[in-house]
Amino acid sequence: MYLSALAMSLVLLAFTSNLAMAVKKEIRSPQTLSRGWGDEISWVQTYEEGLYNAKKSNKPLMVIHHLEDCQYCQALKKAFSSSPEVQELAKDKFIMLNLMHETTDKNLAPDGQYVPRILFVDPSLTVRADITGRYSNRLYTYEPQDISLLNENMKKALHLVQTEL
């Protein structure tokens, strides 16, 4: 009798721990389009959707190319998501897209396919070649220490929309 009670207790314990693990997994929030770049930001899914929304809202589109296993991308993502100024601008003033795959659209790789790469597209659907990072060999790349330059470039993109379009 003692053995059967012990066996029943073990079965009950195993069942409840499995149930608790299943419940814990269900509570987990789904992966958002932010991919860690800013959960408060509204992200579009595709470049085409971004272009449509940019034209419709008269806001610039900011396209971030990155890869999950790239250490430079991860470092930039951390700086980007930790900057309150960049997050606020991205949330309120831009159409935002992050891509984890390369595209065949030459407009999104004007000087080559490398990551991380951030481009600005104005509401007239023009990739802004005049808004670049500080590197001459990879014009659209930014490093974590360049977050203030990225912030300034975001402001420049907004200013150009107001003055040129």
Image (spheres, rainbow, N blue to C red):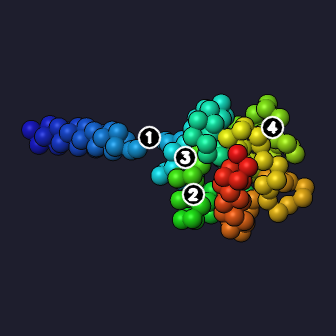
Mark 2 vs mark 1, CA separation in Å: 25 Å
Q: Inspect the image, locate mark 4, and give the three-letter code of the amino acid beneath it.
A: Asn
Mark on residue 89?
2
Of labels 2 and 1, earlier in sequence is 1
Local packing at callout 3 (Cα closer than 10 Å; few below 14, some 14-19, many 20+) is some
Label for residue 72?
none
Residue topped by disc 1? 30
* Image quarter of residue 143: bottom right
The furthest residue to the right: 137
Residue positioned 85% across, 60% down in the render? 135
**Residue type marked 2:** Leu
Comparing marks 2 and 1, which lies closer to the viewer? 2
Question: Cβ–Cβ below 8 Å for labels 4 and 2?
Answer: no
* Figure quadrant of the C terminus: top right
Closer to viewer: mark 3 or mark 4: 4
Q: Is residue 138 left or right of residue 28?
A: right
Query: Where residue 107 is drawn, which disc sits there?
Result: 4
Residue shown at 72%/37% (left/top)? 125
SS assignment at label 3: loop
Kindly state the secondary structure of the residue where label 2 is placed.
helix
